[in-house]
Image: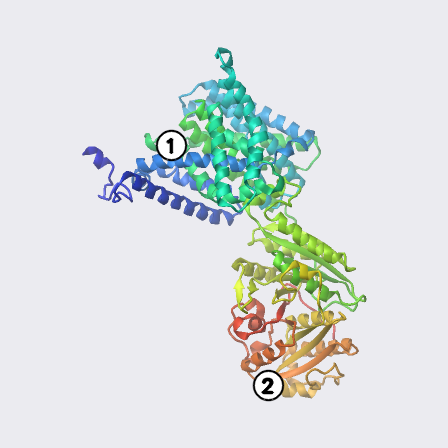
Amino acid sequence: MAESADNSLACGCPANIFSFVEGVAERKLYLLCAQLCVMLVLVRLWHMILRLIRLPQYSAELLAAAVIGPFFVARFSWVKAVLFPPEGVNAMVGFSSTGGLLFAFLCGLEMDPSLIWIRGHRAWLSILGIVSISAALGTAISDTLYNMIEPRTNRGDFRFALSLFFVLTGSPALVRQAAEMKMDTTKVGQLGAWIAVLNDVVCLTMTALMSVLPVISGASMMDNPLEPMMAVAYPVLACVLVGPLMCHVMQDRNSDAQLMVVMGIMLAYTAIGEMVGYNGMVASFMLGIMVPREDGVATSLLDRLYYPVRYVAFPMYMAFMTHVSWAGPIQPMPVLPAFIMAILSTTAKLAMSLGMAWVHKTSLHDGLILGFLLNVRSFPDLIFLAVTVEQRMIDVPVVEAFMFSSFLNSMIAALALLGIIQATKKPNLMISTHAGMEELGVGAEFHLLVCLHNAIDVPCSINLIESCRGSGAFSLSVNTMHLIEYNERTAAQLLYRRDITHMLVGGESKQISDAFEAYRSKVAISMRHSTTISFLFNMHEDICRSADEVAASMIVLPYHMLYRDDGKMQVRNSEIRKLNQRVISHATCPVGIIIDRGLGDTSLTSAAHLSHNRNVFGLFFGGPSDREAITLGGRLSEHPDIRFTLLHFLCSRHSDGLEQSGTRVSSNSAMVQMPQQKSNPKLDSFPEIEKDQMFLNSFRRKYEKNSRVFYEERTLGTEKDLVPALQALDAECTLFIVGQGQSLAPAGLVRSTECPELGPVGDLLTHSYSSITSSVLVVIKSRSHKSFSRYS
């Protein structure tokens, strides 16, 4: 009766949230599902919070494990009773043990052991420096920390474990950190990755030897030395047989059945490793490294296992790896020893990196970045803790101190790196000289930055570039940029591997690059292709920075919706729209958003066989964006297979005054001479209207001898007059070019828009109800550049 009272809450609630379920097995299943849901929500919540301050997802996983594990939940008896009763904890411990094996296998797949042989003496000297300084600090402080924690283990074992803990780094987490902070292609970022890989290999080799040492040391007392021989041959088995067997099984990368077979092979190999003396996580990690990297098998396995392992299995393993603390009495957390260990570990690696920077005459800035990068902790800590607990070198209080110290190391390193990068970032003092197409003189070089998200954007991009190529009298410089959303599944491999053709994004990147290269080989223009990998929330920084570097005359971005066969528009990614809005707000040159409705068909093959002979209509309502759009239309008219028609839409309230200053031209007639504009009180009160008239006069003079340029004026009374006019033009139009139509606001023709960044006309042309089937290019004038008049 007393035991029943202890297992219930003071308020009289049931012992746990599924106590009403009959049957112990059913309750365990329900509790397992509830615990998994809680862990999944916590990981995503921490990830969203930490992303705001640019901290890596690994920190979110550690925080979720800390909250649900012995650092937080285990210290509240009522939470344990409701969500984590003893029967639920026992089930979760078994689940988390398997999750730890999967996580070790995943980390082995991420690492690239070939980096061990490609780096020179600096990496090896750095490893020696880390080992020497860490061993010295660990030996010097071990007695003090031992007395503070008071573990029930041998003092010598604690000293050795502490020194090895100071040496450890975390190469996958380090690479992710470097990639998120845009240091993955810098020399210091690559050097840090190489040093971390070497360091992890050295430390994990020592850990594996610790795991199998009892078997090898007992060989002289054994009558049959078969077991130590099997322990020595065990890694060779993974390299020669098991790894290639996985590649043979994974012939169909998308087969769930074959994936289950591979997981069965991994668990069987791990069980054999435990039988011959290896720790399970060491054996699983060893197998992950031995899986061949050819043909993308390792990448496919990494992609299929990433989400369930990193979001569920790994946090659960972190939370329940010290499951003894769930059942035993609550002990005070060793916070102060953990802080001391974190500071000393950081000091050891900073001392090494600064010393190497002094020896090799590199900057202090690079030395600090390298030192803090090497303090990012990851899975080697987990394997180290698993082996040392198994060998009874440390106990639960030491494990908690090491785990908390590892988390502090990663947080300190991430925050310090952010601070260093922000403090040393040079202000952008560059003033763009190509901030608008309207200001470009005759014969000036046209710099175009074309961005695309995936292969479906390639045909439209190539056709747009071809349209801008014009005649030989105009020079065109094109920079294409493949925008890849940062994804932790590929971050480590994107830095580790030089050849990314077998990567998740590498295959599509190569396809896109080959398509642009094939087009460039057929035309005589300057063209360069690049790739940027960023989070979507800060990708605009890379785009705007590249635009400034190449002095872009215009940035072209894909629309956030795709055109379907039934004529409707389908959202491809809502975050792309926010990216476009941020680019428009920060760019120093005009931005064009292309709505592709078959401008380049839907395949890469069709992009190599361009079909021109197209009609391009430029819609002019007035304002700086509309002037930029018509300027681009004039540029397109230089192409021998493009007919450009400038449609000047006039509001009925201003049409009378405008008739006095120009000649009304009928539809489909060539550009004709209009008399010089006269002073008009109405126009004097509208400076933008004056600029529009001067622009139109200048445009007319420039293209009056071009037989492929046409001009037409139409009067609008209401919005209802605009829709049928555009629908009538759609039948003979290939591409509409339009600005934001700022003059529609004072004219009273503004309608409610779903995409304000496109303006009322652009939104009307892209909306499904308008039944427009032609492609649309909306041009937006830069808000950060003040244009000057060239028409006076």
Compared with residue 462, is residue 126 higher up or lower down, i.e. above or below? above
Q: Is residue 113 visible?
A: yes
CB under 8 Å between callouts 2 and 1? no
Element type at marker 1? loop
Q: Quadrant of residue 441?
A: bottom right
* Image spot of residue 170 (x, y percent): 55, 35
Which residue position is annotated with label 2?
652
Q: Quadrant of residue 367?
A: top right
Q: Is residue 169 visible?
A: no
Quadrant where the N terminus sits is top left
Q: Residue at x 42, y 34 (%)?
A: 97
| Residue 331 placement, left or right of 779 | left
User: Few, some or many C-alpha atoms within 10 Å of disc 2 (few <14, some 14-19, many ≥20)?
Assistant: some
Earlier sequence position, callout 2 versus callout 1: 1
Which residue position is annotated with label 1?
323
* Image spot of residue 265 (x, y percent): 50, 34
* C-alpha span from label 2 to label 1: 79 Å
